[in-house]
Image (cartoon, rainbow, N blue to C red):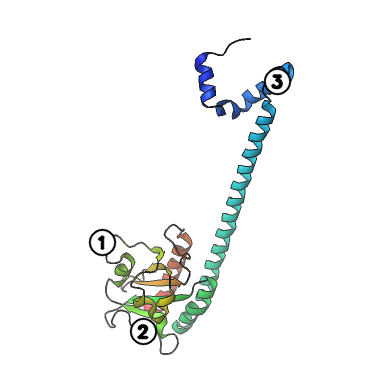
Amino acid sequence: MTELPANLKDEIVKDPSVILDDPDLMRALLKAQDETQGNVVDLRGVFVERLEARLDKLEDTHRTVVAAAYENLAGTNQIHRAILSLLDAETFEEFLQVLDHDVANILAVDVIRLCLESFKAEGGTPIGPEGPLQNVVVALPEQGVAAYVTGGRSSPARQVTLRPASEAKGSIFGDAAIDVQSEAILRLDLGTAQMPGMVVFGSNDPNRFAPDQGTDLLAFFAHALERILRRWVA
């Protein structure tokens, strides 16, 4: 019997996967086993076990990819439904009604606030139409959007921020702030002649919004919302 070179044998012993993961080598070994039927380890069983393990891994990956695809599709449909419902609003008051009720239900959030920077009202003051929609719109001071997003730090404010609820949440959510545990902040560019704004989604679930979640769909929603709002704030 031909002896393996010592260095080759050492490499195989150190990492047997160099043999077991190579289809050509495994086929050659299995053929040799069939021909000799001598003192050879049952490589066929080992090979089958490894193939089964690899198949299980592929199936797990497939299930994960499919689940992520369905989740993304569901999220896309939600965002589209929310935008279409806002587009149907014919007045600013109707827009706020849809934002406060329909959009909140579609996106499964507990409270929504539209925040607009203003020189005319004190920060944190409800400035919506008189009645039940008054709290939906909240005034912010100049630079109030960036200050709320960054917490007063010098870091740049991103368009979409997902995080646990800020300690300053009371200035945004008012009496509803006590139950808000996480929030999504969407910065809004309302045009060169207007001060910026933001829409904030508040959730009573601390895991609803987190920094490691994707923001593409919410960014799209923010861009659509900017264009809709310009009809009333321009």
Q: Residue at x 51, y 22 (%)?
A: 11
Residue 33, numbered label = 3
Where does the image place residue 3, in percent across and percent down from the top left? 58, 11
The residue labelled by disc 1 is 154
Secondary structure of the residue carrying numbered label 1: loop
Amino acid identity at mark 2: Ile
Where does the image place residue 67, in percent across and percent down from the top left? 59, 55
Where does the image place residue 144, in percent across and percent down from the top left? 29, 72
Vertical arrangement, residue 174 with respect to residue 49, above or below: below
Where does the image place residue 121, in percent across and percent down from the top left? 29, 83
The residue labelled by disc 2 is 127
Amino acid identity at mark 3: Gln
Secondary structure of the residue carrying numbered label 2: loop
Amino acid identity at mark 1: Ser
Q: Nearest the camera: 3 or 73?
A: 3
Q: Is residue 9 left or right of residue 210?
A: right
Q: Nearest the camera: 123 or 208?
A: 208
Q: How many marks?
A: 3
- Which mark is first along the chain, 3 or 1? 3
Q: Residue at x 57, y 59 (%)?
A: 71
